[in-house]
Image (cartoon, helix red, strand yellow):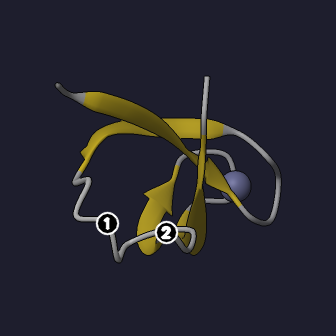
Amino acid sequence: MREYVSLECKKCGTRNYRTPKQVKGEQKKKLELKKYCKVCRAHVVHTEKRK
Ligand SMILES: [Zn+2]
């Protein structure tokens, strides 16, 4: 079963990415990835958001 989450820019709140979440039991804390945000025009930390 695949679970997709959105990655939301921490700075402006724009959802820029979607990624399959790896459910490994231990990974219960929120994902934080540094991704490029079009709105901020910079690499910003993105946090996962469920649909
Ligand atoms: Zn942003």
Q: Position of 28 compared to 25: left or right?
A: right
State the image quarter where residue 10 is shown.
bottom right
Ligand 1: does it lie within 8 Å of the C-beta at label 1?
A: no
Q: Mark 2–mark 1 contact, CB under 8 Å?
A: yes
Answer few, some or many: residues within 10 Å of disc 2's Cα (few below 14, many 20 plus, some between 14 and 19): few
State the image quarter where residue 46 is shown.
bottom right
Answer few, some or many: residues within 10 Å of disc 1's Cα (few below 14, many 20 plus, some between 14 and 19): few
Q: Position of residue 32 (x, y in %)?
A: 51, 74
Q: At numbered mark 2, what does the secondary structure look like: helix, strand or loop?
A: loop
Image point 31% across, 66% down: which residue? 25
Q: Position of 3 compared to 42: left or right?
A: left
Going by the numbered disc 2, the residue's amino acid type is Lys
Q: At numbered mark 1, what does the secondary structure look like: helix, strand or loop?
A: loop
Q: Which residue is mark 2?
A: 28
Q: Quadrant of the C terminus?
A: top right
Going by the numbered disc 1, the residue's amino acid type is Gly
The alpha-carbon separation of the residues under discs 2 and 1 comes to 7 Å
Q: Position of residue 31 (x, y in %)?
A: 48, 68
Q: Which residue is mark 1?
A: 25
Q: Which mark is residue 3?
A: none
State the residue in front, 25 or 42.
25
Q: Position of 30 compared to 34: left or right?
A: right
Image point 58% across, 73% down: which residue? 44
Q: Position of residue 27 (x, y in %)?
A: 37, 72
